[in-house]
Amino acid sequence: MKVLSVVGARPQFVKLAPISCALHEGGFDHVIVHTGQHYDEAMSEAFFVDLRIPAPDVSLGVGSSTHAAQTASILTALEPVLVAEAPDWVLLYGDTNSTLAGAICAVKLNLRIAHLEAGLRSHNRRMPEEHNRVLTDHASDLLLAPTEIAIGNLSREGLRGKSVLVGDVMVDVCLQVARSVADRSVSDLSAVLTPGGYAAATLHRAENTDDPNRLRGLVDALKSLPIPVVLPVHPRLRNRAEAVGLDLEGGSLIPVGPLSYPDMVLLVTNARSVLTDSGGLQKEAFILGVPCTTLRTETEWVETLADGWNLLDPDAEGLREHALRRRPSAMRGWPFGVGKAAEASVAALRRALPP
């Protein structure tokens, strides 16, 4: 059985790692197509090396562009690959432009589509990611859902019959990497960092970076915090800041280049808190037991809001208090599974393919 994975961005590489391993162990023929949506070494190549993912079989090299142009470029470049490979499954990950392009291309060729991380909903139709995930779910033949809430979302849209609860593959890889960095010191990343003495931050969503006034307000709020704030700088943030003459250095803010996944897990594990607009980082903070503040009006990972582990603060009005808060006293549940999601996903692919 042949599975063709379409990936192109950092969160997808992380999800790909345990899936690739499970497919190999299951005896599948696995073809990896890298669209090039994230194209620099720190956001792409390093992840394949650090997470021991096989090198892509095909690299499309589409690079950065507008949503429409990037999606169209992936569609055009991907079609001959799908025709030549004729996979039993086209496996799509998450909610990026690579995901949507893969779905449109595969469904037009009458190829079977499986969507990993299906059923997430922020209910914010201004988010490009929301468009991508909803359209991909409705085009897919098999929906691999990470949580019961995701299953509920799919059921309300009439998709329960092709949905399977498998858990979240991010748990698989996050826990594995956390164990691998347990003996490292966070001072390896910066001599000024001490466990529990800083906040880890990311900022890259279009709604936070495309409006210069909003971007400046959020950066100023991070600079004003009473503890160091380590900010791995996403290419979108760097480009938007340079375009409006915004200096990311100053005050408490410590901008750094994009981190490898193990270094990011090390940074989060030792942080006092996480401040982010990233979907994946909210969940990773929850898995690692670190309080998170999300700089958005909503989250697709509503499970993280339980007992105050994740708070929504879109305008950073309470950021000082939130950044310094202690870990909630309530025990976290494990809504995302216990680290066996990749195995469950591969088993679902095998069961769902007609004889």
Image: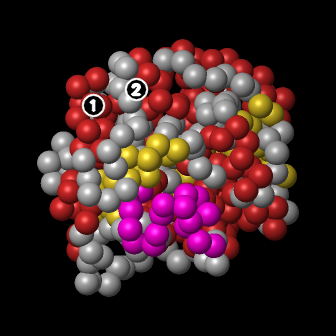
* Secondary element at tag 2: helix
- Residue most toward the top? 69
- Answer with left or right where residue 203 lies relative to residue 170: left
Q: Earlier in the sequence, mark 1 or mark 2?
A: 1
Q: Nearer the viewer, residue 341 or 39?
A: 39
Inspect this view and state whether residue 100 appears: no
Q: Which residue is mark 1?
A: 216
Q: Quadrant of the C terminus?
A: bottom right
Q: Residue at x 23, y 74 (%)?
A: 307
The amino acid type found where label 1 is placed reads Arg
In the drawing, what numbered circle is on residue 241? Answer: 2
Q: Is residue 154 above or below residue 328?
A: above
In this rendering, position of residue 29 left or right of residue 278 = right
> Between marks 1 and 2, how big is the CA–CA gap?
8 Å
Residue 73, compared with residue 335, is above or below; it is above
Nearest the viewer among 126 and 163 is 126
- Stretch in magenta: 184-200
Q: Position of residue 7 (x, y in %)?
A: 65, 40
Q: What residue sits 63% from the left and 73% below the top?
A: 184
Q: Give yes or no for residue 324 being in the magenta stretch.
A: no
In percent of width and height, residue 229 lies at 38, 53
Residue located at (24% from left, 47% from top): 224
Q: Is residue 195 magenta?
A: yes
Q: Residues within 10 Å of mark 1 (few under 14, many from 20)?
A: some
